[in-house]
Image (cartoon, rainbow, N blue to C red):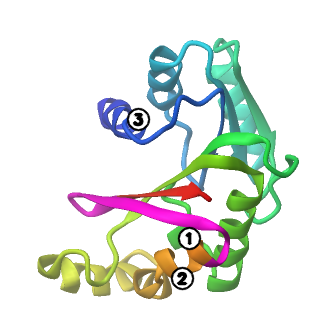
Amino acid sequence: MRWAARRCRNFTNYLPDAISVIYTFSTSVVAPGDFSTLSQAWPRLQIVGLDMSDAYVRHARRHLGRWSRTRFVVGKAEAIPFPDSSQDAVTSIFLFHELPPKVRRSALRECARVLKPGGRLIIQDSLQRDDQKDYKGLLQLFPQNYHEPYYASYTKEDFGTLALACGLVHVRSVMAFVSKIMVFTKA
C-alpha cells in the first residue's frame, strides 16, 4: 500500500489541473492507495477506473466505492468507452508491457483519442532496453522467468515515435528503479 501511495504521488507531479482522469489498471488487484491519494490531492477529480476484467471491476467497486467521484467501467484499453476529447488525463500502470504490439499501438491511439487538447497521458511501466545499462541482463531474463510473452517487444518499443503518430508529444521520462514514468501531452 505504501508503494502504491508513493506511485500515485509521483503521478500527481505530472497531471495537469485535471477534472477527469481515466485510470487503467492492468491485470493486478486495484490498490486502494492509488485512488485515495489521487482523491486527496484533487478532491474534485473525477476518476474512472477501466479494466477488461469484470471481476477486478467488481473488486474495485466493493473496496473503493466510498470515493464519490470514482467509478469503474469494464472495457479494453484499445477500445476506451468514452467520447473523443473527453478526458483531461489518462494514466496507465504496468499495462503496456502486457499487450501484444498491435494492441499496444491501438491502446496508445485510444488514449490519444479520448484526451482533450493539452491533456496528459502518463504511462508507468517497466524500464526499456536502453534506459539503464546495468539492468539490461535482468530485462532480458524477465520474460523467460515470469512468462511475459510480449515483454521483449515492449522493451524495444519507441513510445516517443508511436505517440507522435497519435498526436501526442513526449514531455519527459523519469526512471524509478526498474520502472519508468513516460509523460505525453496531446497537441
Which amino acid does the dot numbered 3 rest on? Cys
Magenta span: chief secondary structure: strand
Say which label, 1 or 3, has the lower sequence index. 3
Label 2 or label 3, whichever lies nearer to me, is: 3
The residues colored magenta run 165-180
Residue beneath disc 3: 8
Label 1 or label 3, whichever lies nearer to me, is: 3
Q: In the rendered view, does 151 fall on the left or right side of 64?
A: left
Label 1 to label 3, Cα distance in Å?
21 Å
- Mark 2, other Cα within 10 Å: few <14 / some 14–19 / many ≥20: some
Q: Position of residue 117 (x, y in %)?
A: 68, 49
For the residue pair 37 and 182, the one nearer the viewer reads as 182
Q: Position of residue 98 (x, y in %)?
A: 56, 70
Q: In the rendered view, does 181 fall on the left or right side of 36?
A: left
Secondary element at image label 3: helix
Q: Position of residue 155 (x, y in %)?
A: 40, 82
Image: 58 above or below 117: above
Residue beneath disc 1: 98
Secondary element at image label 2: loop
Q: Which picture quadrant has residue 138?
A: bottom left
- Mark 3, other Cα within 10 Å: few <14 / some 14–19 / many ≥20: some
Q: In the rendered view, does 52 fall on the left or right side of 131?
A: right
Residue beneath disc 2: 150
Residue at the (48%, 75%) spot, across then down: 160
Which amino acid does the dot numbered 1 rest on? Glu
Residue at the (30%, 30%) spot, across then down: 2
Whether residue 53 is visible here, answered yes or no, is: yes
Label 1 to label 2, Cα distance in Å?
6 Å
- Mark 1, other Cα within 10 Å: few <14 / some 14–19 / many ≥20: some
The quadrant in which the N terminus is found is: top left
